[in-house]
């Protein structure tokens, strides 16, 4: 067995709280999200986890979650690499819209497709939109066609897979203990790759915020197990909260 990999979705962001589609918009953690990240660190500490390297996206909600978790286990000194390939899925023209209100207008089934479908992209964000990330200096090293205007999960898989092969696999082969702090859809993409989930199976995969997930591999780097550190009842409740994000205002209140 190699050293386990811990996956950690960022803590609650301000737009998680407001139930908005976020994607590549760089929204920070709420105070509750910072506390979630601290509790994740305490859980890692309780179970004796330590790391040699950490990876995050280039979005502050993931970066700050990583910092807080590492601070809690007194490991802020380890290398932290930021990679745009770990960014959340790009939601295109949906970015900033309230999920429940969008479900009321377009139907819960359509919102489920936009949120969870493997191959359906939302309407694109225009490249002339000031909010398009092609204008952001953190992506200046990318070609204009590498900065998306909208993504489906298949697009996210296509960028996450080379990150895993080129950065994480060599770290594991070198015996390093790895923490990956990212986003719901980039982590769903990674799990789809590693577990070989079908396009239909991945629709039902929901990842709660700031709950450490431990993945164990054999010496061939084949995935052997995946588990959360928290109590199963806590994980079930957190997953239900993720599911309810896409329900209409009326349905979510019942």
Image (tube, rainbow, N blue to C red):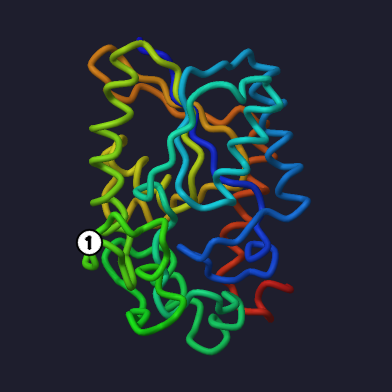
Callout 1 crowding tier (Cα within 10 Å): few <14, some 14–19, many ≥20: few
Q: Quadrant of residue 44?
A: top right
Residue 8: % across, % down: 54, 38
Residue topped by disc 1: 143
Q: Please say if 11 is above or below 146.
A: above
* Residue situated furthest bottom in the rendering: 105
Q: How many marks?
A: 1
- Please report the residue visible at 31 percent of the width from the left and 12 percent of the height from the top: 174
Q: Using residue 115 as the reference point, say whether residue 148 is left or right of it.
A: left
- Say which quadrant the N terminus sits in: top left
Q: Please say if 194 is above or below 132.
A: above
Q: Quadrant of residue 247?
A: bottom right
- Say which quadrant the C terminus sits in: bottom right
Q: Please say if 201 is above or below 97.
A: above
Q: Using residue 140 as the reference point, say whether residue 17 is left or right of it.
A: right
- Please report the residue visible at 48 percent of the width from the left and 45 percent of the height from the top: 182
In-front residue for pair 109/65: 65
Q: Using residue 226 as the reference point, say whether residue 155 is left or right of it.
A: left
Residue 144: % across, % down: 24, 67
- Please report the residue visible at 40 percent of the width from the left and 47 percent of the height from the top: 86
- Please report the residue visible at 52 percent of the width from the left and 47 percent of the height from the top: 207
What secondary structure is found at the residue carrying circle 1?
Answer: loop
Residue 150: % across, % down: 33, 71
């Amino acid at each position: 067995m190699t050293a386990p990999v811990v996956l950690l979705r960022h803590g609650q962001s301000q737009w998680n709280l407001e139930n908005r589609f976020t994607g590549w918009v760089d929204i920070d953690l709420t105070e509750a999200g910072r506390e979630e990240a601290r509790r994740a660190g305490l859980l890692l500490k309780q179970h004796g986890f330590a790391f040699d390297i950490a990876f995050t996206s280039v979005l502050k909600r993931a970066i700050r979650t990583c910092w807080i978790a590492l601070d809690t286990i007194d490991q802020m000194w380890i290398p932290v690499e930021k990679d745009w390939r770990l960014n959340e899925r790009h939601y295109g023209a949906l970015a900033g819209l309230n999920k429940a209100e969008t479900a009321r207008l377009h139907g819960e089934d359509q919102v489920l497709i936009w949120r969870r479908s493997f191959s359906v992209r939302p309407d694109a964000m225009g490249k002339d939109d000031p909010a398009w990330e092609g204008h952001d200096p953190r992506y200046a090293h990318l070609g204009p066609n590498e900065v998306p205007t909208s993504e489906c999960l298949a697009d996210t898989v296509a960028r996450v897979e080379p990150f895993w092969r080129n950065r994480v696999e060599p770290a594991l082969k070198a015996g390093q203990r790895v923490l990956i702090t990212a986003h719901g859809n980039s982590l769903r993409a990674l799990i789809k790759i590693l577990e070989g989930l079908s396009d239909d199976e991945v629709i039902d995969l929901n990842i709660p915020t700031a709950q450490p997930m431990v993945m164990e591999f054999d010496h061939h780097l084949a995935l052997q197990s995946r588990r959360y550190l928290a109590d199963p009842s806590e994980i079930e409740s957190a997953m239900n909260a993720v599911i309810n994000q896409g329900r209409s205002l009326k349905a979510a209140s019942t």
